[in-house]
Image (cartoon, grey):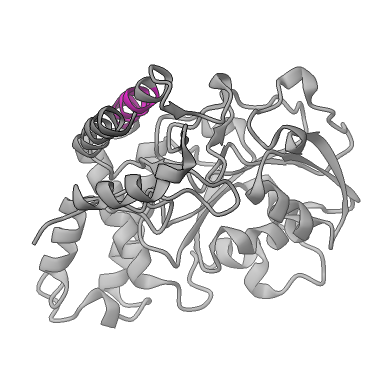
């Protein structure tokens, strides 16, 4: 069997070692005679899996003790409604920074619950830049500031953490979490869908400072109330048990690689290799400003769009798949999350250079 280098934006590659470990444990987890998929989420076997996964995540991200870690369903998109329902409190306004499609979706949902102040909007340039700190028009009376550090579709990434004073900062880190070290204490809340750097789809992780709990509006459904899940250890109902287990294996794998410092070094190197090919060529181009380029999602174009189909077909023959850009952007997009080995980026670089020589 040949493993492809899968550049999908998500669901994305998982580390081969993690998949093999899950395969070995599929029918019988640690002599229990059960698959993890068959376990009661309240049984001692599964509770040990869940506890270890949370502790490993706390370890690799250095999460302070005054933050709760929640393992939830509904993906990151469900948090678009849960955030204003839980965190507005007695305030009426929240700040949102609009840098792409996922920001737009969060804004649209928030408008159902509060007045939204657009603190910055880069739509006028096609979402190809990030606003500077000086360009942020923040409201000191806002309940929170929400932003998307990395926009998966446009490949735009903040190269700084916004300063918001005493206003809580909330980040949708779905496509950048675990890619490098971050200072969790600079955020009031971090949330992320699993299917990029954490594990298989079906899980969303919420890391929330404890002082934000207990503020949910009376209309908040129990399943959207962070306090419900925090007070029940994310076991208020049956959680996505297998996705949680798989995430735990990924956290272990990250530890084995040397933690987030090591992951960050590899990820930076991978991105630099790919951008170097793009920048040192007239055949390829990047639509994103250099100070806003993502490490995780790298869109690029061919000088002649008529060659796009041939490029994708040739790439697939080399085992390089799902490189087609999002339909709203076009061109190509290489998503190079943690599980994409450096060898995969090297193979893509070699193919791009070869294709340019044959077609350029």
Q: Nearer the viewer, residue 358 or 17?
A: 358
Q: Residue at x 13, y 81 (%)?
A: 33
Whether residue 49 appears in this view of the structure is: yes
**In x, y percent, where is residue 48?**
29, 64
Q: Is residue 187 left or right of residue 26?
A: right
Question: What's drawn in magenta, residue-wise?
Answer: 261-275
Q: Residue at x 68, y 38 (%)?
A: 99
**In x, y percent, where is residue 55?**
36, 49
296 is within the stretch colored magenta: no
In this rendering, the answer to whether 25 lies above or below 52 is: below
Whether residue 7 appears in this view of the structure is: no
Q: Residue at x 25, y 32 (%)?
A: 358
Quadrant in which the N terminus is drawn: bottom left
**In x, y percent, where is residue 108?**
78, 57
Q: Nearer the viewer, residue 254 or 4?
A: 4
Q: Is residue 294 left or right of residue 113?
A: left
In this rendering, the answer to whether 48 lies above or below 164 is: below
**Which image quadrant is residue 357 in?**
top left
Q: Nearer the viewer, residue 102 or 238?
A: 102
266 is within the stretch colored magenta: yes
**Which image quadrant is residue 336 in?**
top left
In this rendering, the answer to whether 144 lies above or below 40 is: above
Q: Is residue 252 left or right of residue 148?
A: left
Q: Residue at x 70, y 21 (%)?
A: 132
**In x, y percent, where is residue 61?**
41, 37
What secondary structure prevails in the magenta region?
helix
């Amino acid at each position: 069997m040949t493993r492809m280098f899968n550049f999908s934006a998500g669901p994305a590659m998982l580390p081969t070692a993690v998949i093999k470990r899950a395969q070995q444990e599929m029918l019988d987890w640690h002599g229990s005679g059960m698959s993890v998929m068959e376990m009661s989420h309240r049984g001692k076997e599964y509770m040990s899996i869940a506890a270890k996964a949370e502790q490993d995540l706390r370890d690799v991200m250095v999460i302070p003790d005054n933050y709760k870690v929640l393992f939830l369903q509904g993906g990151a998109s469900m948090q678009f409604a849960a955030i204003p329902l839980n965190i507005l409190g007695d305030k009426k306004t929240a700040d949102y920074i609009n840098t792409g499609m996922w920001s737009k979706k969060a804004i649209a949902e928030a408008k159902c619950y509060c007045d939204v102040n657009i603190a910055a909007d880069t739509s006028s340039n096609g979402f190809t830049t990030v606003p500077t700190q000086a360009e942020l028009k923040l409201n000191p009376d806002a309940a929170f500031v929400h932003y998307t550090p990395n926009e998966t579709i446009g490949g735009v990434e903040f190269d700084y953490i916004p300063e918001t004073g005493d206003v809580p900062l909330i980040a949708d880190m779905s496509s950048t979490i675990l890619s490098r070290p971050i200072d969790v204490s600079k955020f009031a809340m971090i949330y992320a869908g699993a299917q990029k750097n954490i594990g298989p789809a079906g899980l969303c992780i919420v890391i929330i400072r404890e002082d934000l709990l207990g503020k949910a509006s009376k209309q908040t459904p129990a399943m959207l109330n962070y306090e419900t899940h925090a007070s029940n250890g994310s076991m208020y109902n049956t959680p996505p048990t297998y996705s949680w287990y798989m995430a735990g294996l990924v956290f272990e794998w990250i530890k084995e690689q040397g933690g987030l410092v090591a992951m960050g070094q590899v990820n930076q190197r991978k991105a630099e290799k790919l951008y170097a090919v793009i920048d040192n060529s007239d055949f390829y181009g990047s639509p994103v400003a250099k100070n806003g380029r993502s490490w995780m999602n790298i869109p690029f174009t061919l000088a002649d769009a008529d060659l796009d189909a041939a490029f994708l077909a040739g790439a697939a023959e080399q085992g390089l798949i799902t490189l087609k850009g999002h339909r709203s952007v076009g061109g190509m997009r290489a998503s190079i999350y943690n599980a994409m080995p450096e060898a995969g980026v090297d193979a893509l670089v070699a193919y791009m250079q070869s294709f340019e020589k044959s077609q350029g």
